[in-house]
Amino acid sequence: MTNTRNSARSTATPATKFDGFTTEERDAMKEHAQELKTSARRSPRTAKAEAEGDVLAKIAGMADADRVLAERLHAIVRSAAPDLSPKLWYGMPAYARDGKVVCFFQSAQKFKTRYATLGFSDQAKLDEGALWPTAYALTELTAATEAQICELVRKAAQR
């Protein structure tokens, strides 16, 4: 008896063929691997300051629209949750507690998306019922959005 089922691979057309990760995703994974190597080599005494320097350098290298958002977001996170440590995570600014990322910024340019994103990991204390958002689109920072972000970051950073 022969198997008459065709595999997805043999029936895929070039337009629908899955090639794996995008170039941007592969680049982000390579950046993450380099970040892990770099952090492993750092002295425990200087690691925090050097990590913040890496984040600020990454922000400075962003396109204007993303850079403005990332600089302001960095300032908001540092004031709302000073116990979170800045670090790079997949090539993007992130803020961690005890080495685990709580929130992160993803530039629009990095993955060629329409808007930048403020995201929260499962380490964030944002649980609210059975459903809550873990990422927010950022197009501009107004006083109202800054206040909302400040409150989200404070809540996320709770122990």
Image: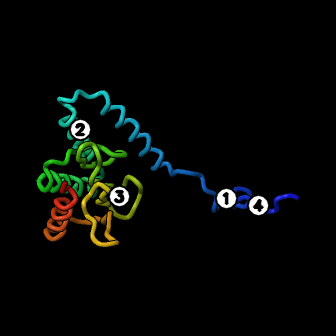
Label 4, label 2: how many angstroms apart (C-alpha)? Answer: 50 Å
- The residue labelled by disc 4 is 6
Name the residue located 21 percent from the left edge and 38 percent from the top edge: 53
In what element is the residue under mark 3?
A: loop
Residue 8, picture quadrant: bottom right
Mark 3 touching mark 2, by CB under 8 A? no
Name the residue located 86 percent from the left edge and 58 percent from the top edge: 2
- The residue labelled by disc 3 is 108
Residue 134, image x and y in percent?
32, 63
Label 3, label 2: how many angstroms apart (C-alpha)? Answer: 22 Å
Which is nearer the N-term, disc 1 or disc 2? Answer: 1
In what element is the residue under mark 2?
A: helix
Instruction: Select label 3 or label 2 by which is in front.
Output: 2
Mark 1 touching mark 2, by CB under 8 A? no
Instruction: Select label 1 or label 4 by which is in front.
Output: 4
Instruction: Select label 4 or label 3 by which is in front.
Output: 4
- The residue labelled by disc 2 is 51
| Residue type at numbered disc 2 | Ala
Residue 96, image x and y in percent?
25, 47
- The residue labelled by disc 1 is 14
Relative horizontal placement of residue 92, taking residue 48 as reference (left or right): right
Label 1, label 2: how many angstroms apart (C-alpha)? Answer: 43 Å
18, 132: nearer the viewer: 132
Mark 1 touching mark 4, by CB under 8 A? no
20, above or below 57, in the image: below
